[in-house]
């Protein structure tokens, strides 16, 4: 019996090697500069030459050199994005968590602050509420946590309650309210300061409620208030609206009481005491 010969397995055609044209160093530098401008790679344009010299000294392979220049571009791009995110947040001043004295707030141990600084609560869409008297560090914490979130690449916006209500009222008058509310809804973190400092009229309270509802259980709001929840009715005038706001801002929230002892006054006294010793 004759055995049937197995048909040969077809093989995929081998891709041709890329053609490489020898060029002078001057021509190579000009080509790199032109390509980097076209592709918007400013770091590679600046670092290609110095990194090539370093790669030659370290005897890196061509792939090793390519990895170095691409990593440099990515690192620099990340740094620029962090700076841009912080600028876009519109913080009124620079405050860092590293400068905050957690020993002054028993409810905020250093481990808890470090955990908040990771931004996991933002990823989970959880609110953060800072309650305490004036000068107890609420705004410092609000800006510090917001800055940390922005440096991690998140979209953050800081605004006082009064400024936000005014912006919403102007948008409503210009028939642009839905666009502005949607813009605030797209943020990863909204830092709302001075909640309860001024009483809102019925219209202002309803406009603010729209932003809070837009972000409910989906995107985080961090707010700071000098009034306990029981007094928020005076801010929102309508008790039912005040209750709805409290309900939305406290559900699965991180609530921190910064106390009554002025952080600013204590810091000023310690600085003066250190200066006189």
Image (spheres, helix red, strand yellow):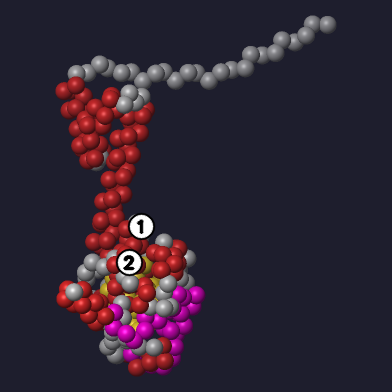
Which residue is at 24% across, 27% downward? 53
Would you identify the image quadrant in which residue 67 lies? Answer: top left
The residue beneath circle 1 is 152
Observer-nearest residue: 239 or 176?
Answer: 239
Secondary structure beneath dot 2 equals helix
Q: Quadrant of the C terminus?
A: bottom left
Between marks 2 and 1 in the image, the one whose residue lies nearer the viewer: 2
Q: Is residue 52 left or right of 9 when viewed as pictured? A: left
Classify mark 1: residues with Cα within 10 Å, few (<14), some (14-19) or many (20+): some
Q: Quadrant of the N terminus?
A: top right
Q: Is residue 118 above or below residue 181?
A: above
As helix, strand or loop, the secondary structure at mark 1 comes to loop
Instruction: Give me the residue at 31% from left, 81% from top.
Output: 136
Residue that badge 2 annotates: 97
- Report the magenta residues as a range: 235-263
- Of 159 and 67, the residue lying toward us: 67
Q: Is residue 116 visible?
A: no
Residue 101: horizontal and vertical position, in percent?
Answer: 33, 72
Residue 9 location (% of width, % of height): 62, 17
Note whether 46 is above or below 245 in the view shown: above
Task: Tell me the quarter of the picture where residue 118 sits.
Answer: bottom left
Comparing 52 with 249, the one in front is: 52
Q: Earlier in the sequence, mark 2 or mark 1?
A: 2
Query: Which numbered marker is on residue 72?
Result: none
Spatial distance from mark 2 to mark 1, Cα to Cα?
A: 14 Å
């Amino acid at each position: 019996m004759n055995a049937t010969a197995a048909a040969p397995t077809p093989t995929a055609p081998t891709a041709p090697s890329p053609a490489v044209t020898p060029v002078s160093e001057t021509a190579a530098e000009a080509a790199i500069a032109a390509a980097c401008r076209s592709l918007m790679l400013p770091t590679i344009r600046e670092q290609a030459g110095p990194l090539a010299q370093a790669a030659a000294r370290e005897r890196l392979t061509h792939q090793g050199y390519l990895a170095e220049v691409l990593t440099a571009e990515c690192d620099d791009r990340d740094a620029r994005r962090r700076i841009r995110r912080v600028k876009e947040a519109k913080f009124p001043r620079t405050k860092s968590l590293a400068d905050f004295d957690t020993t002054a707030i028993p409810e905020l141990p250093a481990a808890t602050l470090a955990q908040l600084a990771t931004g996991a609560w933002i990823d989970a869409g959880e609110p953060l509420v800072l309650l305490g008297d004036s000068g107890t560090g609420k705004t410092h914490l609000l800006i510090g946590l917001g800055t940390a979130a922005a440096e991690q690449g998140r979209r953050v916006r800081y605004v006082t309650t009064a400024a936000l209500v005014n912006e919403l009222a102007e948008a409503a008058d210009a028939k642009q309210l839905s666009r502005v509310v949607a813009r605030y809804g797209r943020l990863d973190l909204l830092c709302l300061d001075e909640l309860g400092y001024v009483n809102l009229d019925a219209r202002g309270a309803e406009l603010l409620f729209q932003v809070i509802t837009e972000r409910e259980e989906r995107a985080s709001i961090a707010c700071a208030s000098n009034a306990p929840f029981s007094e928020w009715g005076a801010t929102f005038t309508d008790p039912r609206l005040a209750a709805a706001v409290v309900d939305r801002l406290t559900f699965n929230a991180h609530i921190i009481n910064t106390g009554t002892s002025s952080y600013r006054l204590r810091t000023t006294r310690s600085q003066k005491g250190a200066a006189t010793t």
